[in-house]
Image (cartoon, rainbow, N blue to C red):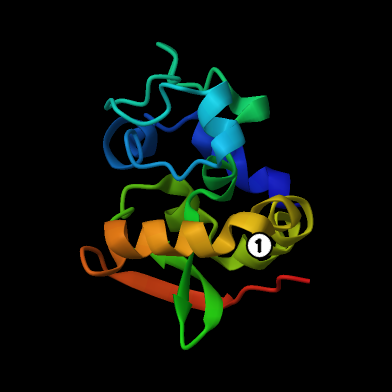
Amino acid sequence: MAKKLWKNCIRCDAECCKRYTGNTVFTTSEERKMFPRINGSRPCYYLGKDNLCTIHNDRPLDCRMHPFDIISKSNKYYWVIWNDYEKCPLLREEGDHFEDYLKEIEKNVMPKLKNYIKDFDKWKDEEYKEKYKYEILREVKLD
């Protein structure tokens, strides 16, 4: 069910990878070794001419969560959507199906991100919290 959400990404003009996240992806030390050019250019260095991700199957954890993100408040972590993605067809057309995808991320991505959650939060805090508005969806389940 959750994979159906991304059908809209295929027909999108990749605005997120061209403009928003092209040079602001959180990476673990392992990911930085695998993708040394992940941060530093807009559009994203790994975005192909066909607007498809050339590293999709191995992309960083931060990219796997996109367009969702995690922030901390009062020592708890929350799923958020940044309000600057108004052009995103996924957010516009599939908003009522987010929970399935969040559960999928918690099952498949969070175990890998768990060791980096404090670094991730610090990086996102410095980069985004004060700069952009966001909508909190719910608390992240880390177990």
Q: Residue 9: give x, y in percent of width and height.
A: 51, 36
Please state which of residues 94 and 109 is positioned toward the viewer in this rendering.
109
Whether 76 is drawn above or below 47: the answer is below
The amino acid type, in three-letter code, at marker 1 is Leu
The residue sitting at 31% across, 55% down in the picture is 86
Name the residue beneath numbered marker 1: 102
Whether 50 is drawn above or below 115: the answer is above
Please state which of residues 137 and 63 is positioned toward the viewer in this rendering.
63
The residue sitting at 49% across, 58% down in the picture is 119
Q: From where the camera sits, is residue 58 visible? A: yes
Q: From where the camera sits, is residue 69 visible? A: no
Q: Which residue lies furthest to the top in this view?
A: 49
Picture quarter with the C terminus: bottom right
The residue sitting at 61% across, 63% down in the picture is 98
Mark 1: secondary structure: helix
Q: Residue 135: give x, y in percent of width and height.
A: 40, 73
Q: Residue 30: give x, y in percent of width and height.
A: 61, 33
Q: Residues within 10 Å of mark 1 (few under 14, many from 20)?
A: many
